[in-house]
Image (cartoon, helix red, strand yellow):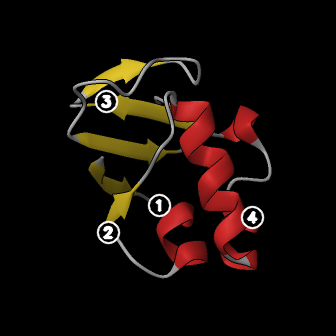
């Protein structure tokens, strides 16, 4: 399947693009992350600490074990803080 993957904040800086179309065979967000990590060092670095990441599937917050079936957009971003 092809997904639109969005990267925000320092993820975008480390990977070097704000968004891309990704062909994946992954069944879950975690599987997608493993595929991305295997691409290049910049992806491995960006996804090295999952505690520092959040994910949204079609603009709804999700967990890393969430299924990708039927999903069109995956967004990765750091946790939000209030102040």
The answer to whether mark 2 and mark 4 are in CB contact below 8 A is no
- Where is residue 1 drawn, in percent x and y? 30, 46
Residue 80 visible in the picture? no
Mark 4 lies on residue: 44
Q: Compare marks 4 and 3 and give the one earlier in the sequence.
A: 4
Task: Give above or below for 50 relative to 57.
Answer: below
Q: Residues within 10 Å of mark 4 (few under 14, many from 20)?
A: some
Q: Compare marks 2 and 1 and give the one earlier in the sequence.
A: 1
Measure the alpha-carbon separation of dots 2 and 4: 16 Å
Q: Nearer the viewer, mark 1 or mark 3?
A: 3
Residue at the image position 41 percent from the left and 57 percent from the top: 8
Taking the image as shown, residue 50 lies to the left or right of residue 24, namely right
Mark 3 lies on residue: 57
Mark 1 lies on residue: 9
- Where is residue 50 drawn, in percent x and y? 72, 38
- The residue tagged with tag 1: helix, strand or loop? loop
Residue 72 visible in the picture? yes
């Amino acid at each position: 399947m092809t997904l639109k993957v969005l990267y925000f904040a320092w993820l975008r800086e480390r990977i070097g693009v704000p968004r891309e179309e990704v062909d994946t065979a992954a069944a879950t967000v975690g599987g997608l992350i493993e595929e991305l990590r295997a691409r290049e060092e910049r992806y491995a670095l960006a996804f090295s600490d999952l505690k520092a990441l959040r994910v949204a599937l079609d603009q709804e917050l999700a967990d890393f074990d969430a299924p990708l079936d039927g999903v069109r957009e995956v967004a990765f971003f750091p946790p939000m803080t209030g102040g």
